[in-house]
Image: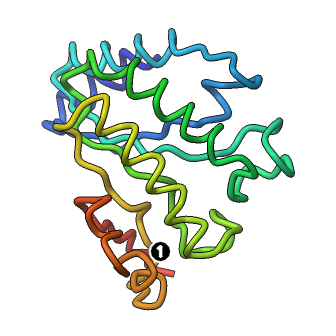
């Protein structure tokens, strides 16, 4: 089914896609990683000339309070996951960037505060860039231009952790 979707995307002339990588999918149990499906997905995209810009999101049930949208209780676990993901994905030249979380300025997607998000961003940025310095790092797309949340992400040298500030604009 995915091959058919990629063929259609290619036929439409689309050469970049925004996709998700769920922490919960690829580390379903603590310290147990399975990237086989993700490798096949990324390779299939490459076979169809599609470059990927994945976002990393969705905390696994076993981490902390069990809620998928809350900050990690142990940032080392998050860091370990991002390091493992970076090591696994560095062989795929069609991955252009990683967006860290998703819509972190909307409570539905992120149950933490700005500083907790900055910690998440720091660990992800450092480990992913260590695996492949050419990858761009993006903040999780904001649901609206949020100067208060962005202010927390630009204090001190925090802005050195990312390259892109995406906005997800909605009609609602």
Give the residue drawn at x 75%, y 52%: 73
Task: Name the spot of residue 114 as percent of width and height, x first.
Answer: 56, 75
Q: Residue furthest bottom?
A: 148
Q: Are there few (<14), some (14-19), or many (20+) residues within 10 Å of tag 1?
A: some
- Give the residue at mark 1: 143
Task: Name the spot of residue 92 as percent of width and height, x first.
Answer: 26, 19
Give the residue drawn at x 84%, y 46%: 66
Name which quarter of the figure residue 16 lies in. top left
Left or right, residue 156 beside residue 103 = left
Camera-nearest residue between 45 and 115: 115
Camera-nearest residue between 135 and 1: 135
Camera-nearest residue between 139 and 44: 139
| Mark 1 secondary-structure assignment | loop
Left or right, residue 116 beside residue 13 = right
Give the residue drawn at x 34%, y 20%: 42
Name which quarter of the figure residue 22 lies in. top right
């Amino acid at each position: 089914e995915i091959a058919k979707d990629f063929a259609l995307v290619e036929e439409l002339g689309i050469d970049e896609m925004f996709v998700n990588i769920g922490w919960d999918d690829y580390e379903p149990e603590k310290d147990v990683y399975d990237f086989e499906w993700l490798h096949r997905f990324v390779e299939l995209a490459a076979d169809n000339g599609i470059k990927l810009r994945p976002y990393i999101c969705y905390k696994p049930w076993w981490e902390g309070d069990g809620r998928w949208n809350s900050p990690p209780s142990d940032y080392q676990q998050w860091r370990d996951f991002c390091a493992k993901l970076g090591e696994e994905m560095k062989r795929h030249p069609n991955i252009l960037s990683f967006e860290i979380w998703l819509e972190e300025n909307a409570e539905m997607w992120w149950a933490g505060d700005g500083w907790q998000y900055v910690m998440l961003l720091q660990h992800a940025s450092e480990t992913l860039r260590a695996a492949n310095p050419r990858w761009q790092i993006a903040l999780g797309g904001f649901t609206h231009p949020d100067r208060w949340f962005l202010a927390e992400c630009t204090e001190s040298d925090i802005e050195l952790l990312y390259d892109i500030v995406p906005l997800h604009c909605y009609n609602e």
